[in-house]
Amino acid sequence: MFVSDLLTYGKLRCPTDVECDTFADTMCTFMNDCSNHGSCSSSTGQCVCDSGYYGADCSVAPLKLSLTQSGTFVETSLTKWQYFKIGDQSGEDYSLQFSNDDNTLFDVYIKYGIDTIPDAVDYDVILKNQSTVNLSSATFDCSSGCMGAVYVKLASGSETKTVSY
C-alpha cells in the first residue's frame, strides 16, 4: 500500500481521516508537545516553534553569546550539540574564540540567518576536527545573524570535556 501511494500520488496517504488524526496526535506526543515552546499541528503532528526556539520538538534555545565576556560553552561527558546565535542586528561586530582544555577535537557548524539551526547536513560553513576556532565579523558576515553549533563527540565512558569561549 505504501509503495502504491508513492507511485500513484507521489506521497503517503492515510486510508481514513481517523487514522491520520491518530497519527498526528501520536506524533505530537512523541514531540513532547513541542516542549511547551510551540504548538503542534493536529493535522500533521509537526511542531511550529515559538520565536527563539528551534528543533523538531522546539527544545533548542540557542545561547546568545556575550561578545564581551568568556565562559564555559559546552561541558559534557557525552556526544553533544550546543547551539549559539551571533548577531541579529545589522552592523554588530563580534570576535569569538572557542577552545578546549585539552586536545579533544570538536566541529563548528555555521548557518547564515536566524531562521534555522545548523546540523550535520544543513549548514553553510563547517570547521571539522578543531581544537581552537576563531570567529569574527571580519571573517564571517553575520550582519543579518548566524546560527551556530559546536559538536563534541566523545567515546563512551570518557571523562568530562569542556569547550569554552
Image: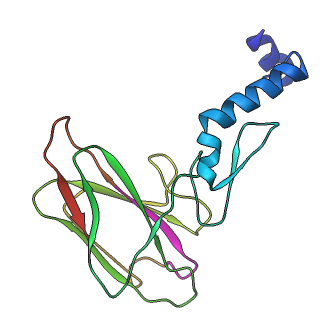
Coordinates of residue 76 in the picture (x, y in percent): 25, 51
Q: From this viewpoint, which residue is outermost toward the right?
A: 17
Q: How is the image coloured?
A: rainbow
Q: Residue at x 82, y 19 (%)?
A: 19
Magenta-drawn stretch contains 147: yes
Q: Residue at x 89, y 17 (%)?
A: 16
Quadrant in which the N terminus is drawn: top right
Q: Is residue 122 above or below residue 133?
A: above
In-image side of 74 versus 25 (left or right): left
Coordinates of residue 77 in the picture (x, y in percent): 22, 46
Of residues 10 and 85, the one nearer the viewer is 85
Q: Is residue 27 above or below residue 91?
A: above
Query: For the magenta stretch, what is the residue range?
Result: 142-150
Q: Quadrant of residue 149?
A: bottom left
Magenta-drawn stretch contains 76: no
Coordinates of residue 133 in the picture (x, y in percent): 26, 69
Of residues 108 and 154, the one nearer the viewer is 154
Of residues 26 and 148, the one nearer the viewer is 26
Quadrant in which the C terminus is drawn: bottom left
Residue 10 shows in the view = no
Q: Quadrant of residue 5?
A: top right
Of residues 112 and 159, the one nearer the viewer is 159
In-image side of 113 versus 126 (left or right): right
Q: Is residue 89 above or below residue 2?
A: below
